[in-house]
C-alpha cells in the first residue's frame, strides 16, 4: 500500500506583539553642556535676585523738605574773591558762614570764582 501524505496543518502562529516605544535614553551632557547649563542657572538666579532687590528696596529720600531761599545775583568782577563778595554783599554776618552758603547755593566745587561768573547770593542771611 502506498502511503499517501496527508497535509498537516501548521501550528498556529502566535500574534506578534505591537512594537512599544522604548523609553528615551537619559540626557547626557558633555562637559561644555554642563558648563552652559550652570551658567544659565546662575544668570537666571542673578536676574531673580536683581529683580527682588529692585522691587523691595525703597528709594532714598534725603531732605525732602524744601526751604525757599530769597536770592539776588552778583557778577564777579576781576580780582574779587568769594570772601570779599560775602563781606560786601551780606554785612553783619560771619564772612565764612556766608561764603559757605554761597558755595552751597551755587553748587560750587570750592571757593574759587572767576571774573564774569554769576553768583546767587542769599538775601538777609
Image (tube, rainbow, N blue to C red):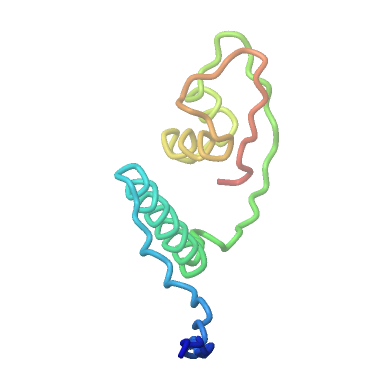
Asked if residue 125 is positioned above or below residue 81 in the image, the reply reads below
Residue 111, horizontal then vertical, whole percent:
46, 25
**In the orientation shown, which residue stands out farthest toward the left?**
31
Residue 83, horizontal then vertical, whole percent:
47, 25
- The front one of 111 and 48 is 48
**25 horizontally vs 120: left or right:** left
Asked if residue 8 is positioned above or below residue 105 in the image, the reply reads below
Asked if residue 107 is positioned above or below residue 74 in the image, the reply reads below
Please identify the quarter of the rendering in which residue 102 is found: top right
- The front one of 49 and 119 is 49
- The front one of 40 and 3 is 3
- The front one of 25 and 93 is 25
Please identify the quarter of the rendering in which residue 48 is found: bottom left
Tell me what residue is drawn at x 41 percent, y 34 percent: 96
Tell me what residue is drawn at x 34 percent, y 42 percent: 32
Residue 40, horizontal then vertical, whole percent:
42, 52
Tell me what residue is drawn at x 50 percent, y 82 percent: 16
Residue 77, horizontal then vertical, whole percent:
64, 13
Amino acid at each position: 500500500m502506498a502511503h499517501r501524505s496527508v497535509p498537516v496543518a501548521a501550528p498556529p502562529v502566535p500574534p506578534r506583539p505591537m512594537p512599544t516605544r522604548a523609553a528615551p535614553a537619559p540626557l547626557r551632557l558633555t562637559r561644555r553642556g554642563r558648563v552652559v547649563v550652570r551658567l544659565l542657572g546662575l544668570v537666571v538666579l542673578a536676574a531673580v535676585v536683581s529683580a527682588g532687590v529692585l522691587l523691595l528696596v525703597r528709594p532714598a529720600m534725603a531732605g525732602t523738605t524744601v526751604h525757599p531761599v530769597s536770592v539776588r545775583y552778583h557778577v564777579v568782577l576781576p580780582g574779587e574773591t568769594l570772601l570779599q563778595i560775602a563781606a560786601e554783599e551780606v554785612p553783619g554776618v560771619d564772612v565764612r558762614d556766608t561764603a559757605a552758603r554761597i558755595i552751597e547755593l551755587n553748587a560750587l566745587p570750592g571757593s574759587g570764582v572767576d571774573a564774569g561768573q554769576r553768583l546767587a547770593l542769599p538775601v538777609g542771611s
